[in-house]
Amino acid sequence: MADPFETLGLDPAQTALYAAVLRLHRATRTELAQAMNGSVESIGRQLDDLVKLGVVEEQSGQYLARHPAAALGKVIARRLERLAEESRRIDSALGSIRGLIRDYDAGRDFQDGPFTVELVSGADVLYESVVGIALQSPPMTLLTAVPDERTMTDFVRKFADPWIDAQKRKLLTVHAIIPVSTLPQPGVRDQLGRLIETGGQVRTLDRVPSWFMAAGPDTAGLPAAWGGNLPDHAYNFYLVRTPLVVGVLRSLFLELWGRAVPLPWGRRGDGMVQVLRLAAQGMCDDSIARQLGVSVRTVRARFADAMAELGAQSRFHAGVEAARRGWLS
């Protein structure tokens, strides 16, 4: 088995000298030189190196070895510091060439010729094409923004099931941003609940700027008119197959996602919604606890969770904000 100190960078002479200091416990340079059959000058230089490494201490001309575990820890810490510094230099180098990487991608797209743009028409084609793209390279992450109630209604009534089934089969994972105004629509909660249960994620905004999607790393969907909805344009949209456009839409989606609000569905979210709904009916904490079959402490904890999630300063404010976001529908 390799000597641990040699493994961490101590040469054999340093390791042997450290072992001698351990045996003698307290020794001068002269005593150590005699024990090592070396010159005082050579042993002194090696002792200075061991002191710098933190494995030996010097006290009034005498040298004491640190405990082997402490000494090894000191050497490891120094090695980790060097590795961390090297990692920081690598991160800095990567950051400095990000612009060059973007230029390379843009140049590659230009050399490949015009972007591949395909005009597609029809809601069936839209939703089937997403599953088709996922089948080619599963598992695929789909980022999509839905700006209006009509598109949302069509989705939950006719087209949610194939996407939910594809998620169950691990073909894709849906991340969707929808307007908060769509939550009270019939069927929306049930279908979005199923989408979330099978691995999807949904967040809401007061206003979503336009429909678009990014399907995997290479395919983007753009509306016939930016800012419009799909039903008003007979579900005409463009499939654009280039990483550059997909990257732009991904960046836009992530910016919107950071401002959007998660749905309060799931065990913890349902508990928050329950207490807010009952409080809106004028019930006190004790009555809410009896109604739900939980302790008053649990009720108050759920109120605290709801206030934190909604960024509210009071229960009243939390109730108003929950209603605005469609939680109580």
Image (cartoon, grey):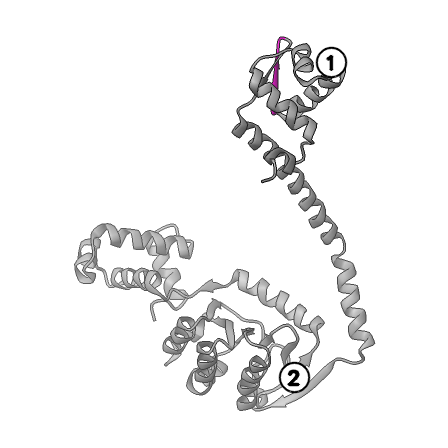
Residue 107 pos. (x, y %): 81, 70
Label disc, if present, on residue 40 of the rendered structure: 1
Q: Write down the quadrant of residue 226 in the picture.
A: bottom right
Residue 293 pos. (x, y %): 18, 60
Q: How many marks?
A: 2
Residue 62 pos. (x, y %): 62, 11
Q: Nearer the viewer, residue 9 or 52?
A: 9
Q: Please name the residue that numbered disc 2 is placed on.
A: 238
Residue 300 in view, yes or no: yes
Residue positioned 68% across, 30% down in the render: 12
Of helix, strand and loop, which one carries label 2? Answer: strand
Q: Nearer the viewer, residue 304 or 167?
A: 167
Residue positioned 44% across, 79% down in the render: 164
Of helix, strand and loop, which one carries label 1? Answer: helix
Residue 241 pos. (x, y %): 69, 79
- The mark lying in front, picked from 1 and 2, is 1
Q: Write down the quadrant of residue 73 in the picture.
A: top right
Residue 173 covered by magenta stretch: no
Q: Is residue 256 above or below residue 77?
A: below
Give the residue type that dot 2 points to.
Tyr
Give the residue type that dot 1 points to.
Val
Furthest-front residue in this view = 37
Q: Is residue 102 above or below residue 59?
A: below
Q: Quadrant of the N terminus?
A: top right
Residue 58 covered by magenta stretch: yes
Residue positioned 23% across, 60% down in the render: 282
Q: Nearer the viewer, residue 189 or 108?
A: 108
Mark 1 and mark 2 lie on one chain; the one further toward the N terminus is 1
Residues shaded magenta: 55-60
Magenta highlight: main SS: strand
